[in-house]
Amino acid sequence: MTSTAWLRQVVGRRIGRRGDADTDEAVAREAPSAAVAVVTAVAVAASIVVMLVLIRPFTVGPVGFDSAASVLYFDRILSGQKLETFLGATPKPLLTLVYGVLYGLTHDWRFVSWSVIAVQAAAVGAAGLLIGRVAGPSAAAFAAFGLLGLAPLLTDVTLAYATPFALLAVLVAGLAVTRTKPAYLLAGVALLPATLARIEVLALVGVVTVAVVIAYARERSSGAARRRPTYALLLIAFLAVPIMMIHDVLLTGDAFYWLKVSGVYSATYPDTVLSPIELAGFVIRRYLPFAPILVLAVVGVTWAVRRRQWPTVVGFAGVGPGILALLFVLAARGTYTSARYFILIDVALVLAAAIGVGVVVRIVAAALEGRSAAVARIGGVARAIAAVAVGGILAVVLVRPWAPLDTRTRASLTSNVQTFRNSDTAARAIRTDSDGRYARDGGTLIIPPLLQPRLAVQLNLPLTRVVSSAVAASGSLLPAPRPGDYVVHESRLDRPATAYDRYEVAQPLAEGDIVLDPLVSDRRGGVWVYNVRPR
């Protein structure tokens, strides 16, 4: 089949050799914009409901280590105080500002959680609008409901991590450059906070830079170069680098602290670092279950290339292969690569697959219309409804596991929420014990490491007094508690669990010349809080 015939079959009208440049606008006009708008609105509403049901941020605000650290960073910068010790959370200036202001105004983690839920819902809507603009209502439904059910992304929302912010900003940039008249300034401004939320977005910015250089070189060679090519405004995103440097100078005095956190973590925990070969194995294991998605993604990207949808192609290249290449560079340098770094790649695959779904649905619909008079008589509204239904159903079936229906994912989210409920219980017990003895007597909090920034913020303590717990081979707690200290044990965070069995009691526990008095003993919730006094 020739490319012209292929396009005719998909679009359903004659396209001449000169029609390639006009095809993008034609597809945008022919796509049922009303159907895309409706499916986007439904997906946004469904996303909010799903997140509220699964996360339940009503009595507790689930905010994980990195995001709680952002609040702490804001406090240190605002007070003019340097970070007192290393904290293994790479600074994210966007979260420092947003979460710092929210918590500073409310002193309530729930507002932080609600903000990321709103951002994620907006990202679902933006994905539907963007992909619907490119490939129609079935693609919009697949994109929106695919992101709604993407388990790693939903887990990030539960922890109030930065990926939803970066995703929304990247999608806004995509919407800006796929307009009939591209808004390059808006796109460049949108990529700036995306990079300030997730550093790996720099890979996308790098690919965009290459595309800008190629476009300018082609214009120069054809004699059509403009003095000030407006697409160069995309490079505004590079302002993220000096902003990160200023942020870290204010926080630590070191402009490159943001580059060093992963290196320090890698040196401290070398067993977590994957070699390039090990990383390749991880990639294969992660994406083997995505095989149908990968096939559809290839169809979608191929279609975009044939249509010369270059902004779409560049976006997928940056968020997919671009970030993947960056992760292999980090592995080659012996730097830790978290599974969280792959979430934007997951998103790129789902969105590219959504375009593939739109292409396949159009081909099937055209074939059915040509062979059945009854199908040909179906009205436009009914066709749009059918296309949306097909896209949504395929998203639920192919995005595995589809989080809202997956028992394991729901259990994991519930466990995360309980952990933060336990953290708040511990903070409340410590704060009210003897009217704030923890602050007055200068005691140390010995706690699970993942609660360090959260409890430091809640109890207004320096990090030097909020230290990570461990259990020695002898069975004793490290660091050794002293009178005036507090010990928090959370059964989901302290590992190995069996090592902490002796700290799961409801009566005073004697250790040498000290006694641990239980303030909280909640076996069902999985939290124990002790104050330490002389024996």
Image (spheres, rainbow, N blue to C red):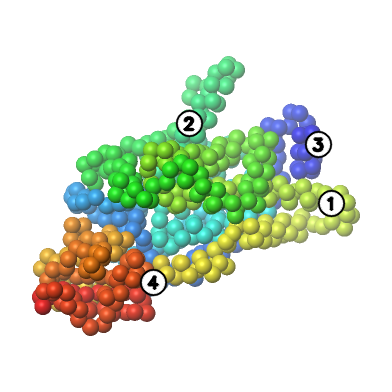
**Quadrant assignment for the N terminus:** top right
Q: Residue at x 48, y 70 (%)?
A: 411
**Closer to the N terminus: mark 1 or mark 2?**
2
Q: Which residue is mark 3?
A: 1
- Circle 1 residues within 10 Å: few <14, some 14–19, many ≥20: some
Q: Amino acid at mark 4?
A: Gln
In the rendered image, the vertical position of residue 129 relative to residue 230, given as above or below: below
Residue 21's x, y, as percent?
68, 32
Q: Amino acid at mark 2?
A: Thr
- Circle 3 residues within 10 Å: few <14, some 14–19, many ≥20: few
The residues bearing labels 4 and 3 have C-alpha atoms spaced at a distance of 57 Å
- Circle 2 residues within 10 Å: few <14, some 14–19, many ≥20: some
**Closer to the N terminus: mark 4 or mark 2?**
2
**Closer to the N terminus: mark 3 or mark 2?**
3
Q: Nearer the viewer, mark 1 or mark 3?
A: 3
| Label annotation for residue 209 | 2
Q: Residue at x 43, y 43 (%)?
A: 275
**Closer to the N terminus: mark 1 or mark 3?**
3
